[in-house]
Amino acid sequence: MDNKTIYHFVGIKGSGMSALAMILHDQGYQVQGSDIEQYTFTQRDLEKAGVKMMPFAAENIHAGLTIVAGNSFEDTHPEIQAAKALGLRILHYPELLGELLAGHTSIGVAGAHGKTSTTGLLAHVLGGIAPTSFLVGDGTGKGIKNSQFFVFEADEYRRHFLAQAPDYMIMTNIDFDHPDYYHGIDDVFDAFQTEANQVKKGIFAWGDDPELRKLNAKVPVYYYGTSERDDFQARHILRTVKGSEFDVYYHDENLGHYVIHLFGEHNVLNSLAVIAVSHMENIAHAEVAAELLSFQGVKRRFSERKMADMTIIDDYAHHPSEIKATLDAARQKYPDKKIIAVFQPHTFSRTIAYMDDFATSLSLADVVYLTEIFSSAREHEGKVSSADLGAKITKGGTVLHLNNMSPLLEYHDDVVVFMGAGDVQKYEKAYESLLSDSSLKNN
């Protein structure tokens, strides 16, 4: 790391990039960046910290900069071309993250699903006990000089996590995702196996995942879950409308009773992984239990608000497994209310690959609505539509449009869950505006 250079982030508003920029800023490095002019939720912390942000332009690039390129930006980007012409050092996001891990007890969290929530939970728990730097995929990051721990979300897309060799790694699951890159489940497993070979002290893996059970690592693999064959077990689980509680055992050793104000079976498992890591680092169980109690979640993961007589939940879920987990959590917290799902499919390739799985997961809601498919920078069109998915859904499947969210006004004293990794929040805002107008008229 260089104290004399200015680290210029190309795509600084990206969730991982903004977090990484905040870490460098917190540690005293000079940071700036460029991105689209449209407002994104990730820029708030950057603005509060006084980090300079500017629109993309080749003119932003000059001598004295070190370029940090976001994963979405190719060498053809004007700023990267300008940097190459000047002979500037260019680092990609995963490479810089790998460099930052030195000097800390580093713990990565990888998995097709659940890594952001688990990373946020782990950072919260360890950060309440010892100095902890962290990078979470919801756009939050904090850098502390000489921190004991460095907790980070490890991204399997395009094998980016292979640039990191942490002390520990939590692996929440191995599932076929990113069909635009991976060829199938065996290809995904190969990426995780390669990363497992780079871990230095130990791996914590969900025991019910058949792919994770195949791992052959140079370090111990501790499995966590609810089965007797797991090393770390959650027993006597009680799920209520206030959260969940459970006992934790390491083999036959009782590690204590834990309570979380989180919902869904997946959050019991995420907590169990955090407890397992803490145990191996000899952290007092009472301290871990106290920190778990105060965790409120991460951005865009089961974020709730009340409006009129409705409960509105916003969630990043965009894969069938994530949808299932989110609806399971909603059902746990609101067992007596109707659950209405509004889902924005994310990319054409993912919609085609998981068409039947989406229909199955969404059926856990009482009523399902869809929006049009959200395309990506790599994929602008495809041979599938939301209507094709809607035709497979038995509990609705109507496609909503931004200029007409009125079908949702039919529901009262119910729960609407907006899910998606694109811009589904604009549909939320349109619905909230209608709901507000409707409430004013009725009053």
Image (cartoon, helix red, strand yellow):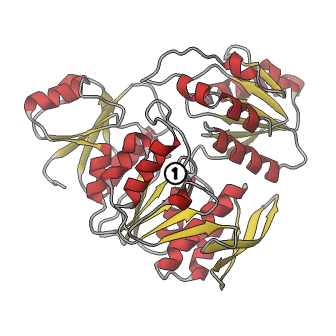
Q: Is residue 291 visible?
A: yes
Q: Relative to 21, is 113 on the left or the right?
A: right
Name the residue: 85% across, 22% down.
441
Taking depth in this image into account, of 188 and 321 the one nearest to the observer is 188
Q: Is residue 390 above or below residue 135?
A: above
Q: Quadrant of the C terminus?
A: top right
x, y percentage for residue 130? Answer: 44, 74
Q: Is residue 276 above or below residue 44?
A: below
Q: Quadrant of the N terminus?
A: bottom left
SS for dot 1: loop
Residue farthest to the bottom, as pictured: 253
Q: Relative to 353, is 162 on the left or the right?
A: left
Q: Which residue is mark 1?
A: 111
Q: Is residue 35 above or below residue 8?
A: above
Name the residue: 42% across, 65% down.
217
x, y percentage for residue 248? Answer: 67, 76
x, y percentage for residue 209? Answer: 61, 56
The image shows a total of numbered marks equal to: 1
Q: Classify 10 Å Cα crowding around label 1: few (below 14), some (14-19), many (20 and above).
A: many
Q: Relative to 133, is 408 on the left or the right?
A: right
Residue 309 found in image quarter: top right
Amino acid on which the number 1 mark rests in the picture: Gly
x, y percentage for residue 318? Answer: 61, 36
Taking depth in this image into account, of 146 and 238 the one nearest to the observer is 238
Taking depth in this image into account, of 62 and 217 the one nearest to the observer is 217
Q: Is residue 306 above or below residue 35?
A: below
Taking depth in this image into account, of 147 and 327 the one nearest to the observer is 327
Q: Is residue 263 visible?
A: no
Name the residue: 54% across, 25% down.
349
